[in-house]
Structure formats: structure tokens, C-alpha cells
Image: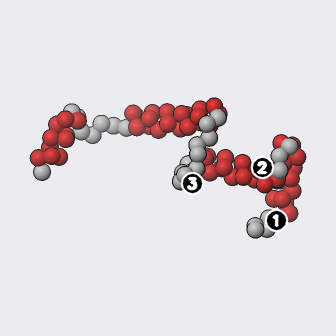
């Protein structure tokens, strides 16, 4: 069991009251949101959240990564086939 400071517990209770959820649930949801925001991988064997909001968030993160990769400079102008042939020749 984790003992929380009074201020933290009071915040959790206020949020739980506003959301009409149990205190434990709002703490879990807040931590899950923070984990996602930090880009920490989910626990293995945990089902993905299939909600439209979660799917849209995953898609947005993927699009952001793809855009970042597309903006990177091309350091080797050879075709992928030529690069693979050179790697296989060794």
C-alpha cells in the first residue's frame, strides 16, 4: 500500500468527485495518461485501448514519428537493392 501525502489524496478525491469515479480509478487513469505522454511502453500482455480517442492518439504519435523520419537527410543515395547487394557481398 502506498501512503500519499494529504495534498495528493485531497486532489485525487476532488477529481474522483468531479468525475464520479472511485479515487483509485482516477489515480490509475492519471498515471496511465502520464505514462502515455512520456512515451513509456505499456506492460507486456496488456490489451491496447481500442477507444477512438486512444487509436487517434496512437495514429498521431505514428504520424509525428514518420514526419520526423521523412525530414532526416538521405546519407546514402544508392538504391536499397545496391545497399543490400553491398552488405551481402561481405
Question: Residue visible at 11% across and 47% down?
Answer: 89
Q: Is residue 6 visible?
A: yes
Q: Is residue 40 left or right of residue 6?
A: left
Distance from Cα at disc 3 to Cα at disc 1? 27 Å
Q: Is residue 35 above or below residue 62?
A: below
Question: Residue visible at 15% across and 41% down?
Answer: 85
Q: Is residue 39 left or right of residue 81?
A: right
Distance from Cα at disc 3 to Cα at disc 2? 19 Å
Say which of 16 and 48 sits in front.
Answer: 48
User: Disc 3 or disc 2, which is closer to the eye?
Assistant: 3
On residue 43, which mark appears?
3
**Residue named by callout 1:** 5
N-term mark: 2 or 1: 1
Question: Residue visible at 72% across and 52% down?
Answer: 28
Q: Is residue 40 visible?
A: no
Q: Is residue 86 left or right of residue 11?
A: left
Q: Give residue 58's position: percent from left, percent from top.
A: 55, 37
SS for callout 3: loop
Amino acid at each position: 500500500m502506498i501512503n500519499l501525502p494529504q495534498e495528493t489524496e485531497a486532489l485525487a478525491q476532488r477529481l474522483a468527485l468531479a468525475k464520479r469515479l472511485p479515487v483509485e480509478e482516477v489515480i490509475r487513469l492519471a498515471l496511465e495518461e502520464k505514462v502515455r505522454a512520456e512515451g513509456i511502453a505499456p506492460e507486456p500482455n496488456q490489451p491496447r485501448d481500442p477507444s477512438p480517442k486512444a487509436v487517434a492518439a496512437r495514429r498521431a504519435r505514428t504520424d509525428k514519428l514518420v514526419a520526423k523520419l521523412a525530414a532526416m537527410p538521405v546519407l546514402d543515395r544508392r538504391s536499397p537493392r545496391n545497399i543490400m547487394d553491398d552488405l551481402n557481398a561481405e
